[in-house]
Amino acid sequence: MIVIDKAGNGLITIMLDRPKRRNALDSVAMAELAKALGQAADDPDLRCLAIEGAGGGFSAGRDLKQAADLDQDAALAQHAAWGEVFKTLRRLPAPSVAVVEGAAVAGGFTLALATDFLIAERSARFGALEMANGFPAAMCTPILAKKAPPRLGLELALFGALETAERLFEAGLVNRIADGADGLATERDAFVGHILSLDPLAVRQTVAAYRAAESQPLDQALTAGVTLNQLIEASGRFRQGGAAFKQS
């Protein structure tokens, strides 16, 4: 259900592989996804994580057909695993990229939004469709509150409508749009390739600083920035960079 591909260049790809169920996540798939993300977070070779869906779609989110048959204990365990997915994405030491083709709706929308970057095929569709079933998008709503403009975020959480990749791109929730499956693969390779071309330590430091700054007052974030600069100075990396610049 969850296929992991670890490339030798530091890229780890997690594939949601239940195409006959539109890559919906049942209890097994959620547990596997949480485990795969935990392993990636602890992998010292990780430089970038990509999440994709098999069969021309990203994910329909939680498998509601199975959810209806779960007893309370199993349902609570499933919710805990789902929460662990997003907490682990948040603590990844390297950037994460969602590559979306087809539909990313309900929990699939949440998963795509929770990554650091989102690349979409132009015809992809997104939406917090939980509201169409009469309940709030409980995990998606706080992520939208952090990442979307306030008026748009509440609309996306409340209306539960299908949205185009173009609209989310214009709102800054999608980083790149590509045409067709081949174009999406090309854009993915270029985007991920650029991340992999950067200094690994500098990437990790930038990711850590950015995530910390999101929840800090600006004064505290700037103080942390000064400390990071001092650590870089003490390590000699500024001098190394200056010497390389002189030779260029």
Image (spheres, grey):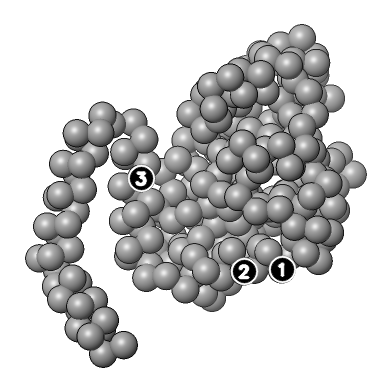
Residue 198 vs residue 18: left or right? left
Residue at the disc numbered 1: 186
Q: Position of residue 60 (x, y in %)?
A: 78, 35
Residue 8 vs residue 188: left or right? left
Marks 3 and 1, how far apart in space? 27 Å
Residue at the disc numbered 2: 190
Residue 194 vs residue 58: left or right? left
The quarter of the image holding the C terminus is bottom left
Q: Is label 1 in contact with label 2 (beta carbons under 8 Å)?
A: yes
Three-letter amino acid code at disc 2?
Ala
Residue 86 against residue 192 in the figure, above or below: above
Q: Position of residue 110 (x, y in %)?
A: 63, 33
Residue at the disc numbered 3: 210
Residue positioned 44% across, 49% down in the render: 92
Q: Position of residue 226 (x, y in %)?
A: 15, 49
Residue 242 against residue 17 in the figure, above or below: below
Name which quarter of the figure residue 232 lies in: bottom left
Three-letter amino acid code at disc 3?
Tyr
